[in-house]
Amino acid sequence: MSARSRPSQWPWARRLPLSARPGAVAEARSCTADFLADVADSRMVADAVLLVSELVGNAVRHTGAPRSLLLVRCRGLLRIEVSDASRRPPLPRTPYGASESGGRGLFLLSRLALRWGWYPASPGKSVWCELRIPGDRS
């Protein structure tokens, strides 16, 4: 849904089915950037795209069974949810050293999101976070 064709009623939502196929993370990033195309704050959009990348990447890497990305936008707020087929809760850990990759996803989530959490969702779980959208009055 393009910014020009948005419905006048809130909330706006978009769901993207996911799988562990190559390109799933890139598709989720693109979907998020498109969903937020009318947001003037480019740093907020970059943060949202980064968190989607981390959440979907974690679902692929740690569960092998990502199910969907859900983006819900209300006035001034974006909720991101990524569901997967694993019942294991997300476990925050200390990021690896600067020269190593990995271990930063939930750390970034805790720093960039207003709040985050997870809940059981048959047959697995959903990890969610919320971001403020400055000046969102559409």
Image (cartoon, rainbow, N blue to C red):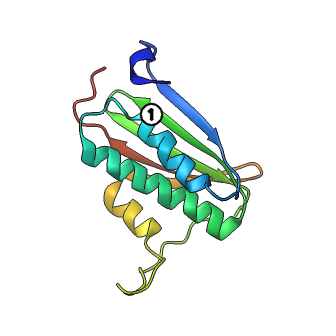
Residue 28 horizontal side relative to residue 61, left or right:
left
Residue 8 horizontal side relative to residue 69, left or right:
left
**Image: 88 above or below 68:** below
**Image: 88 above or below 19:** below
Residue drawn at x 70%, y 58% as measured from the top left = 20
Location of residue 90 by image quarter: bottom right
- Where residue 45 sits in the image (x, y, percent)? 33, 44
Residue highlighted by disc 1: 35
Residue at the far front: name it: 23
- Where residue 39 sits in the image (x, y, percent)? 30, 33
Q: Is residue 85 something that shows in the picture? A: yes
**Relative to the observer, which residue lies in front, 14 or 30?**
30
* Kind of residue indicated by mark 1: Phe
Residue drawn at x 27%, y 22% as measured from the top left = 137
Q: Is residue 114 something that shows in the picture? A: no
- Where residue 129 sits in the image (x, y, percent)? 45, 50
Location of residue 87 by image quarter: bottom right
Residue drawn at x 44%, y 20% as measured from the top left = 10
- Where residue 12 sits in the image (x, y, percent)? 47, 25
Residue drawn at x 62%, y 65% as measured from the top left = 89
**Relative to the observer, which residue lies in front, 20 or 93?**
20
Location of residue 110 by image quarter: bottom left
Residue 114 horizontal side relative to residue 17, left or right:
left
Secondary element type, mark 1: helix
